Amino acid sequence: MSGFSVNEPSRRMKWFAGILVVFYALVTLMPLLWIIATGFKSPADSIAYPPKVIFRPTLEGYVNLFTTQTRITPDMEEGLEPPKNWVEQIVRDKGMVIAGPSRYVQRFMNSVIIGFGSTFLSVFLGTLAAYAFSRFRVPIKDDLLFFILSTRMMPPIAVAIPIFLMFRQLGLSDTHMGMILLYTAVNLSLSVWLLKGFIDEIPLEYEEAALIDGYTRFQAFYKVVLPQAMTGIASTAIFCLIFAWNEYAFAVLLTSGEAQTAPPFIPTIIGVGGQDWPAVAAGASIFLLPVMVITILLRKHLLRGITFGAVRK
């Protein structure tokens, strides 16, 4: 009898699959690594041709990202005090002085407020709706579910002008609440469909046993269903957060000052001679960190959310 098994790949296939995965990972990560590296380049190195792979690292891009600078004449520079720290030294070497902080931190915090706020609302409302669709007899349930899903099929640009006019009439333009409500409405269809699939997999007998023991319907939902659906809730929250965190079209159209998020702000960073690419790359690198860290911490839940329902017992 041959030692070959259809269930166990050969050593050669394992090596080939490993090399293929590593190659794919390198190709996928290359743009990200290039953005991170550009954040540590000087403006001249960032636009050099051919592109520089080996360069002298500098924090000039991060200094430009977090500060607003103004140019001074040599006569004015002679009357100034010596630089107090390395940040002022970098700016002074360019013949400029720091005029104040930039708006990046404010824009970043707007992204945090809007992104996490809309994610919480989407998951909260989506969990309640998904439980209702999964456990109760809802009239025309299939039609309602299809209608909810169809809102996700619509491109944002198709409803951009009506939403802009509606927000202007309601006073929601350039407000945190307006963007949170908008992103919640967009993400709600995704959260309802994902969470309904998870709740459908939880046996109904668990709730029936809890009801027999004297639990109310809400107590059965809170103490029985919700803990078992945490994997689905976590993965759904990641998907909703990624959309709200990276969304660009609505943010450009509906915000300009108070509630502007980081995605439309980062491309507008202008240097002395034009686009400050190291500062843009530094802003993009910092902007990636929160979602990247959360995704890595919850990667097991995310994988479960992608593959749920693929294997049935």
Image (cartoon, rainbow, N blue to C red):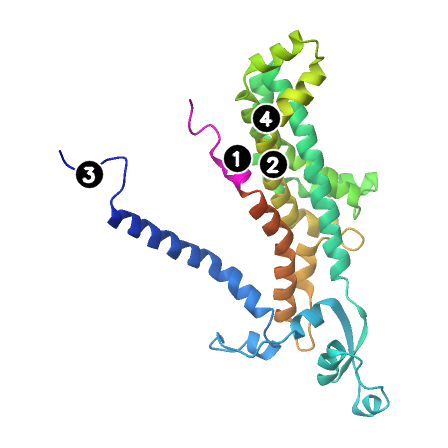
As measured in the structure, the alpha-carbon distance from the residue carrying label 2 to the one carrying label 3 is 40 Å
Residue 29 location (% of width, % of height): 48, 58
As measured in the structure, the alpha-carbon distance from the residue carrying label 1 to the one carrying label 4 is 13 Å
Q: Amino acid at mark 3?
A: Phe
Q: Amino acid at mark 2?
A: Ala
Asked if residue 210 is positioned above or below residue 182 in the image, the reply reads above
Q: Which residue is mark 1?
A: 305
Number of residues whose C-alpha sits closer than 10 Å to that of mark 2, classed few (under 14), some (14–19) or many (20 or more): many
Q: Nearer the viewer, residue 139 or 69?
A: 69
Left/right of residue 77 with respect to residue 11 in the rendered view: right
Q: Amino acid at mark 4?
A: Gln
Q: Are marks 1 and 2 in contact (CB under 8 Å)?
A: yes
Image quarter of residue 66: bottom right
Image quarter of residue 126: top right
Residue 294 location (% of width, % of height): 61, 47
Of label 4 and label 3, which has the lower sequence position?
3
Tell me the number on the disc at residue 4. Answer: 3
Q: Which residue is mark 4?
A: 228
As measured in the structure, the alpha-carbon distance from the residue carrying label 4 to the one carrying label 3 is 40 Å
Q: Nearer the viewer, residue 36 or 215?
A: 215
Q: Which segment did they paint magenta? A: 300-313
Q: Residue at x 66, y 23 (%)?
A: 129
Residue 250 at least partly seen: yes
The N terminus lies in which quarter of the figure?
A: top left
Of label 2 and label 4, which has the lower sequence position?
4
For the residues carrying marks 1 and 4, which lies nearer the camera in this image? 4
Asked if residue 213 is positioned above or below residue 307 in the image, the reply reads above
Q: Residue at x 69, y 56 (%)?
A: 262
Q: Which residue is mark 2?
A: 234
